[in-house]
Amino acid sequence: MLRSNRPSVFGARSLAVLCCMLLLATTTAARGERDPIARRRGEHCSCDSAHVFKNVFFPPSIASPRPGGKPDARRVGDNLYVNGQIGEDLMTRLLVNGSSLSAEATLALNNTLRVLEYAGCAYRDVVLYTVYLADGANLALTGGVLANMSLNTGTPNTVYNAARGSFVGRTLPQDANFAFDYVAYACNWTAAARPRSTRWNRPCGCQQPYHHYAWDLPANVSLPISPSKAYRRVSRGGSYAYVTGTVGENFLSAGVLVSGGLAAQLNKSLDNVALQLAQAGCALTNIVQVTTLLSNWTLLPEVNALHLQYLGSAVGPFIGSEKLVTGIKLDALIQHNVIAKNCAFNTTPQYFF
């Protein structure tokens, strides 16, 4: 029997099909489409925007420069970090005196919204906001203003970290009663938030309306969050998960702290953090930043030792900071604000927005 020296057509075609399948699998993995929700929604892909770093300044027609030449916001990758906003006149940069507390809080939030819009973000793009109060008695009022703002401008499924009090020994800028820090994700960037080089301005081609998710805790482990409160337990923006400010409370006991002092509160608070992270498919090993709010600086040495004992072996080194505040939620001794990254995100969120 004579054999042909020509390569088999079937073998060549099979090899070509195999190469295409491998290329498709590699591309799919690179785009993050192993996440079933990401695959269905189509919002994940590898974009060059991760390298973007751009300060955002209001033009003189909108606002005067901030003291010290600070930007009004800063874009890093797909995130926009809005500089702390108070109830000031943007043209004079002076606190508006004589207004009610509600009007001051609303003006501060409106200033935040103007910064977001100038950079191309909507209120619904917010994944994390932190509230600072000069008087913890104003927390309920602030919650109402926030809820009203959310209902008027977008879906209120962001994470709310409330530091109920000013820094001890200090006041907020210009003796303001409120200050707000915001983080937004995956906005429709305007020229003000885009770098000059067109290399980083290429459209990703994969952003969809549903690029944020949020989770609450199930009824068997937590009482539901009041509908009047504009936050969820965990909010996801891209590869990051933001956990709402957490203290050592029993979620089934309507805000009752555990007994036993600092060690008991710290351990319960971190247990609660782990419980909330798990709802989003995250673990303690995914933590990249922990901000610890303390009611007293004398607690810091014990807190460091307890953190090392609880988190050291599981988490390893992470970015952390401590802040001294008065009037932490439920008058707790300690509160944790946690950010995680690169979670499995293999659970189904209750909210898409």
Image (cartoon, grey):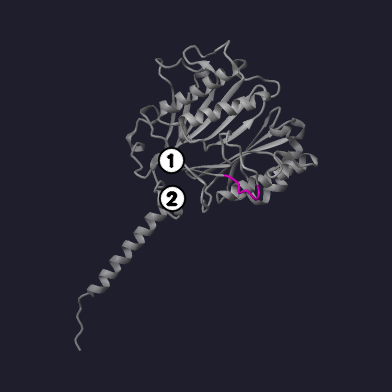
Could you give the CA–CA distance between mark 2 and mark 1, rounded to whole angstroms? 18 Å
Regarding mark 1 in the picture, which secondary structure is present there? helix
Q: From the image, state whether disc 2 or disc 1 is nearer to you.
A: 2
The answer to if 267 sits in the magenta stretch is no
Residue lying at the far bottom of the rendered structure: 1
Q: Are marks 2 and 1 in contact (CB under 8 Å)?
A: no
Q: List the residue tagged with mark 1.
A: 50
- Front in this rendered view, residue 338 or 298: 338
Q: Amino acid at mark 2?
A: Ala
Regarding mark 2 in the picture, which secondary structure is present there? helix
Q: How many marks?
A: 2
Image point (68%, 47%), residue name: 271
Q: Position of residue 16 (x, y in %)?
A: 28, 66
User: Residue 308 occupies which quadrant of the picture?
Assistant: top right
Residue lying at the far front of the rendered structure: 227
- Front in this rendered view, residue 47 or 343: 343
**Between discs 2 and 1, the one toward the N terminus:** 2
Describe residue 168's horizontal placement relative to residue 58 as left or right.
right
Q: Position of residue 175 (x, y in %)?
A: 62, 16
For label 2, the crowd category at 10 Å Cα-Cα, with few meaning under 14, some 14 to 19 and many 20 or more, is some
Residue 216 seen = yes
Image quadrant where one finds the N terminus: bottom left
Q: List the residue tagged with mark 2.
A: 38
Q: Amino acid at mark 1?
A: Ala
Residue 31 seen = no
Residue stretch in magenta: 216-221
